Image: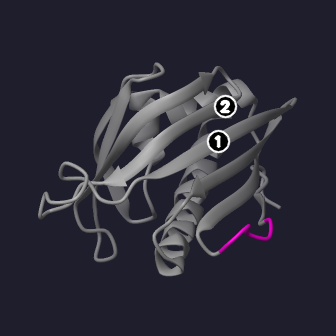
Amino acid sequence: MAEHEKSASYSPPKSDLVLEITRRFSAPREVVFAAITQPSTFQQWWGPKGCTCSVCEIDLREGGAWQTTLVGAEDCDTNTVGGVYKEIVTPSKLVFTWSWTQVDGKVNGGRGPETVVTIELHDEGDKTLMNFSQQIFSDAEQCQKHRSGWDSAYDCLDQYLSKTQ
């Protein structure tokens, strides 16, 4: 494998409406936590390949809001997503809500259906094991679309971390 080891595996889903990803990053837990919580760092890698993060607002406290806007290539129109932090345990755990902004503004105060994301980071010295889950999706197709997006985003995080380590 390359200098920055990529290791990903998937747990059998509890249902077609729950997304679970396990991934190992070749960076210490504190570095990975900073990459997913500090706006200036997050903005450098966030989004599926081909997209850039034009807006990144993070109020890192329980009850604090976060929002990002992705702009990009043909597979990534301009999209805004955000939510609220429910639990923060530095540097090991984040729980937050996730909802895309809807153009019609009719759902959830202008936001799409809401899911809950949980990220747990386990210290492995110079590596970090991440357990990720997002639930509950409205249908299996949405769950699968998010899997593709998260997989690509975590590939981008891998690339970012390999440049900084």
Residue found at the very far right of the displayed protein: 124
Magenta stretch: includes residue 14: yes
Foreground pick, 97 / 156: 97
Q: Position of residue 25 (x, y in %)?
A: 74, 46
Q: Are marks 1 and 2 in contact (CB under 8 Å)?
A: yes
**In the image, which residues are magenta?**
11-15
Seen at 24% across and 68% down, the residue is 77
Circle 1: element type:
strand
Q: Is residue 87 above or below residue 130?
A: above
In the rendered image, the vertical position of residue 77 relative to residue 29, given as above or below:
below
Is 142 in the magenta?
no
Image coordinates of residue 46 in percent, x first then y, are 44, 48
Mark 2 sits on what residue?
Answer: 93
Count residues near mark 2 (Cα–Cα under 10 Å), then give few for <14, some for 14-19, many for 20+: some
- Tell me which residue sits at (79%, 70%) in the image: 12
Magenta residues, dominant SS class:
loop
Q: Quadrant of residue 35?
A: top right
Q: Which residue is rendered at x = 46% and y = 19% of the image?
A: 61
Query: For mark 1, what is the residue?
Result: 119
Residue type for callout 2: Lys
Q: Secondary structure at mark 2?
A: strand
